[in-house]
Amino acid sequence: MLLQIVIPVYNEADNIAGTLDEIAAKVSAPHTIQIVYDFDEDSTLPAARRYIETRRAGNISLVKNAYGTGALNAIRTGLDRCREGAALVVMADSSDDIGIVDAMFSKLNEGYDLVCGSRYMKGGRQTGGPLIKKMMTWTAGISLHVLTGIPTHDVSNSFKMYRVSLLRQISIESRGGFEVGMEILVKAFAGGGRIAELPASWRARRSGKSRFQTMKWLPGYLRWYCYALRHSWFKRSA
């Protein structure tokens, strides 16, 4: 099974080489990488091209956002291009725990459809970042796990690995930002998909500006939180 890594970018010239180096050093599963960008002037592109040329990295491709602009559309573009095997969304700022990618891949090979990198289960941790964001994501993850039985403590983390056949069964409705990962998760859970989680460490970016817009995207997260609650309620009352 091939692992296809999707990296949405926005002016990540200072971070992309380090992230690609980390993937090369820590991921032994056979993989390709899509760097998905919004516009031709993105500062990521010259840095990525230099990396591909100097490392002779034929498994890395540059893909222009096919749906407009923004993180959501970049992720959708990358996932749509994954034809078989497994897909993983990774941030370009080295915030995600690349060291557990092979273990996530092994879980999919065991038969799981979706594997979550979890900051809030035992063994996971989060370093840095806005306190309000941490409180909101922790509360959402723990409460939804308790109230619905969804088998992860971290519903909002974008660092998830998907079986591509699962993705093809889900119609994306999100129109905001990174909440698309939560949408796929709760729809997979509602549809009976097999879901696992592994403890993950998350660290705040050290260079550049985060694209995460907490208040702007909050309604989208709330939508999928309520979706999971409704599904759980209907299932129990059936």
Image: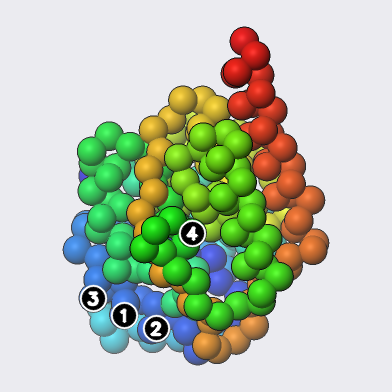
* Residue at (50, 78) in percent of width and height: 127
Per the model, the C-alpha gap separating discs 1 and 4 is 27 Å
Residue found at the far top of this picture: 238
Q: Nearer the viewer, mark 4 or mark 3?
A: 4
Of helix, strand and loop, which one carries label 2? helix
Per the model, the C-alpha gap separating discs 3 and 2 is 12 Å
* Residue at (36, 63) in percent of width and height: 123
Residue 218 - label: none
Q: Position of residue 20 (x, y in %)?
A: 36, 76
Disc 2 residue type?
Ala
Residue 21 - label: 1
| Quarter of the image where the N terminus is located | top left
Q: Earlier in the sequence, mark 3 or mark 2?
A: 2
Residue 17 - label: 2
Disc 1 residue type?
Asp
Per the model, the C-alpha gap separating discs 4 and 2 is 28 Å
Disc 4 residue type?
Tyr
Q: Position of residue 28 (x, y in %)?
A: 19, 63
Q: Nearer the viewer, mark 3 or mark 2?
A: 3
Per the model, the C-alpha gap separating discs 1 and 3 is 6 Å
Q: Position of residue 96 (x, y in %)?
A: 44, 69
Image position of 18 with respect to 198: above or below: below
Q: Nearer the viewer, residue 81 or 182?
A: 182
Dot 3 and dot 2 residues touching (CB under 8 Å): no
Image position of 76 with respect to 119: above or below: above
Quarter-wise, where is residue 25 in the image?
bottom left
Per the model, the C-alpha gap separating discs 1 and 2 is 6 Å
**Residue designated by label 3:** 25
Dot 1 and dot 3 residues touching (CB under 8 Å): yes
